[in-house]
Each structure stands twice: as structure tokens, then as C-alpha cells.
Image: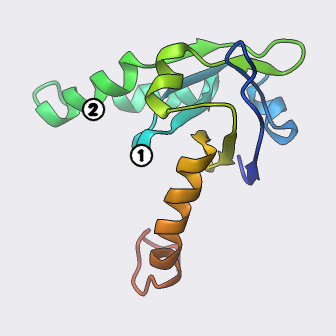
């Protein structure tokens, strides 16, 4: 499970060093793709295979499912961390997420998210009040 918040830098070659706590699970390979809210989603290869099995079950007759799958999968890139635990972020994904030098990498349970640091701060500021004031069940069975 991926947890926590980290602040690595993007190097001049478009690579990021994976947080130490994430390395074991991601060392055999990752799949990164467009995430919602203009961040990147990073999955272990195993987790992405499980996700893909679920995705394949979406009805081809659903336009919403087709549209979502096209955007989600067309941006996917399989990467393998190097010996220094760096992983390259393809240019199209860097552009999609507006990634510059300062990054915020968060653990989001089954995936890692990579954000431009200023975009993350804006998002977090906007969402904290809603989070603090939630009075009804958002995730069934959680509280």
C-alpha cells in the first residue's frame, strides 16, 4: 500500500527518483498514465494488470466507458526504474500534468500520484475544507 507525501525534483532528463518507501513494490516495473485532476497515476505492473482485467469488462457499447478508456490507456507508459531508482516520465505525460522541477508524490493506496507541487498545493487547499466538513458517508462502510 502506498502512503505519504514526498517532494522529489524532476531532473533535466525528465526523471524522478522514487520515494524509498515505494521502491520495493515498484522495482519490477511500473505503468504510469494520465490521472484525473491533471496528475499522473503510477501503478505497479501487477496492480495495473489487475486494473486492466477490470477495464476489459467495460461494455464496448458504452460511449462513456470507451471515452474514458481511450484517454486513460492511450497515455499509459510502461517504465522500469534504473539502478538509482529513477524513472523517466515521458514528455507527453509531463506536459499533461504540467510537471516542472518541483514535484509532489503522494501515496494513494493502490497507486502513486505525481503532481506539480503548486498544482498539488492548490488542490489540497481547495479540498481540505470539504474533507474536514464531510458529514455523510462518502465511501460505503468507511465510517
Closer to us: 60 or 102: 102
Calculate the distance from the C-alpha at mark 2 to the C-alpha at mark 1: 14 Å
Q: Secondary structure at mark 1?
A: helix
Residue drawn at point x = 27 percent, y = 32 percent: 68
Residue 56 can be seen in this image: no
Residue drawn at point x = 21 percent, y = 28 percent: 67
Badge 2: residue crowd in 10 Å (few <14, some 14–19, many ≥20): few
Residue drawn at point x = 28 percent, y = 22 percent: 70
> Is mark 2 in CB contact (under 8 Å) with mark 1?
no
Of callouts 2 and 1, the N-terminal one: 1
Which image quarter: residue 100? Answer: top right
| Picture layout, residue 15 above or below residue 143 | above
The residue under label 1 is 37
**Residue 119 placement, left or right of 37:** right
Residue drawn at point x = 21 percent, y = 33 percent: 65
Closer to us: 73 or 124: 124
Q: Position of residue 24 (x, y in %)?
A: 84, 31
Amino acid at each position: 500500500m502506498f502512503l505519504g507525501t514526498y517532494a522529489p525534483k524532476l531532473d533535466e532528463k525528465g526523471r524522478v527518483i522514487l520515494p524509498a518507501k515505494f521502491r520495493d513494490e515498484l522495482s519490477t516495473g511500473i505503468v504510469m498514465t494520465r490521472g484525473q485532476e491533471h496528475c499522473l497515476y503510477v501503478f505497479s505492473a501487477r496492480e495495473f494488470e489487475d486494473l486492466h482485467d477490470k477495464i476489459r469488462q467495460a461494455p464496448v457499447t458504452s460511449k462513456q466507458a470507451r471515452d474514458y478508456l481511450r484517454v486513460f490507456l492511450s497515455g499509459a507508459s510502461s517504465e522500469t526504474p534504473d539502478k538509482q531508482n529513477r524513472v523517466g516520465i515521458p514528455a507527453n505525460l509531463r506536459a499533461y500534468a504540467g510537471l516542472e522541477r518541483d514535484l509532489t508524490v503522494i501515496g494513494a493506496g493502490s497507486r502513486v500520484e505525481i503532481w506539480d507541487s503548486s498544482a498539488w498545493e492548490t488542490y489540497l487547499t481547495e479540498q481540505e475544507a470539504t474533507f474536514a466538513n464531510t458529514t455523510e458517508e462518502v465511501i460505503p462502510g468507511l465510517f
